[in-house]
Image (cartoon, rainbow, N blue to C red):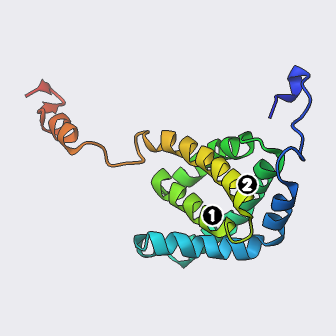
Amino acid sequence: MPHPTLGLPPASMTGGHPEAAARLRREHDRIARLALEATLRRFPDMRKRYDELALRQLLRDYEQHIEQLARAVESNDGSWVTNYAEWLVPIYRRRKIPMKEFAALILGLRDAALTVLSPEEAEHASRMLDLWRERLRRHGRLPGDHKGNPIVRFFWKGAGIGDEGIV
């Protein structure tokens, strides 16, 4: 999507698959339920880690995820999902959901979206979701999203550096 202040025309919202986007929007409730079920089936430990309220919140989030996917499929522009992924990273970090699990939610969305899309449209939607997951993968490497290297952590903690300096 070109930046509006550069004087470039906006992205065409009919450049991709508008019929597929309309089906995604029409079936968003069913797709959201199927996506969460697919994610929990693929990663059953998420059910243990998150309570009922957190799972409901993730189900509610799917409504906007599906809308952003529909916009990307409709316009054939991946910036709808990549910019949205950038915007969501701090929100999911604040909820203490690692990017690896957020990417798992996107995999569940892919499985559910295939139920309403034709093979050509599904391939196009999969490319958009791959862009989304690639953006999340970059954020998953940042500190705080993973436990880190235990050997490096051992040396930093075990170096004997105290308030007085090296002991």
Please rate how many residues cluster around mark 1, counting C-alpha atoms within 10 Å: few if below 14, some from 14 to 19, many from 20: many
> Would you say residue 4 is visible in this rendering?
yes
50 or 138, which lies in front?
Answer: 138
**Amino acid, disc 1:** Leu
- Secondary structure under tag 2 reads helix
Label 1 SS: helix
Q: Position of residue 37 (x, y in %)?
A: 56, 76
Q: Indicate the quadrant containing the N terminus: top left, top right, bottom left or bottom right.
A: top right
Residue 117 lies, in percent from the top left, at: 74, 65
| Residue indicated by mark 1 | 109
Mark nearer the N terminus (1 vs 2): 2
User: What amino acid is at disc 2?
Assistant: Leu
Identity of the residue furthest to the left in this view = 167
Labelled pair 1, 2 in contact (Cβ < 8 Å): yes
Residue 75 horizontal/vertical position (percent): 83, 45
Residue visible at 60% across and 51% down? 91
The structure residue drawn at horizontal position 87% and vertical position 55%, both measured from the top left corner, is 18
What label sits on residue 69 in the rendered view? 2
- Badge 2 local density, few (<14 within 10 Å), some, or many (20+)? many
Residue 24 placement (x, y as % from top left): 78, 65
- How far apart, in angstroms, are the residues tagged by discs 1 and 2? 9 Å
Q: In which quarter of the image is residue 33?
A: bottom right
Q: Is residue 84 left or right of residue 14?
A: left
